[in-house]
């Protein structure tokens, strides 16, 4: 046969290293890495390159580099690593906040702010908020 056989045309599973909480590596099978959302692929690549430096003097520097690559803070990288260790690939997906779209300020404070602003007591409003 000249063309690829049906056996070689199949997508071969890829083994992806996932860190466990016991500091031993666990392997997770990913059937088709390209089927993952691009953001997850990017995060996975960065996490795997970061794990090479875990426990070394360069780990903090590599965390900063990972943060720059992903456009997030170092603290967010640390949270992402923790999430990845605990949940695997699912930990690399973005999750919506449960409080998304809800007011963070109580209705009582909102009413006070609007009333004070409308009455022209802007200086008082600033002092009250401090």
Image: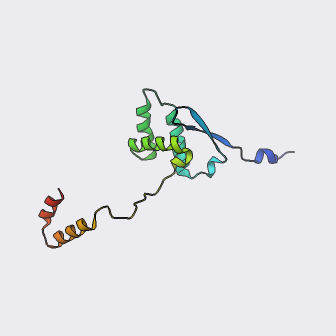
Which residue is located at x 57 percent, y 53 percent? 37
Number of numbered discs: 0
- Image coordinates of residue 28 in percent, x first then y, are 62, 41
> Which one is in front, 122 or 96?
96
- Image coordinates of residue 40 in percent, x first then y, are 54, 49
Which residue is located at x 28 percent, y 64 percent? 106
Direction from residue 94 to residue 33 in the image, left or right:
right
Direction from residue 80 to residue 26 in the image, left or right:
right
Direction from residue 61 to residue 46 in the image, left or right:
right
In the rendered image, the vertical position of residue 122 relative to residue 66, given as above or below? below
- Image coordinates of residue 93 in percent, x first then y, are 51, 51
In the rendered image, the vertical position of residue 11 relative to residue 51, given as above or below? below
**Occupied quadrant, residue 63:** top left
**Occupied quadrant, residue 12:** top right
Q: Residue furthest top?
A: 57
The quarter of the rendered structure image containing the C terminus is bottom left
């Amino acid at each position: 046969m000249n063309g690829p056989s049906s056996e070689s045309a199949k997508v071969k599973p890829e083994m992806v290293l996932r860190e466990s909480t016991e500091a031993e590596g666990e392997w997770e099978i990913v059937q088709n890495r390209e089927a993952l959302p691009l953001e997850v692929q990017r995060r996975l690549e960065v996490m795997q390159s970061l794990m090479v430096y875990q426990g070394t003097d360069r780990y903090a520097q590599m965390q900063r580099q990972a943060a720059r690559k992903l456009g997030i803070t170092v603290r967010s990288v640390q949270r992402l690593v923790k999430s990845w260790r605990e949940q695997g690939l699912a930990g690399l997906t973005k999750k919506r906040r449960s409080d998304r779209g809800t007011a963070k300020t109580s209705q009582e404070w909102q009413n006070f702010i609007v009333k004070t602003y409308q009455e022209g007591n802007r200086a008082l409003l600033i002092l009250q908020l401090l």
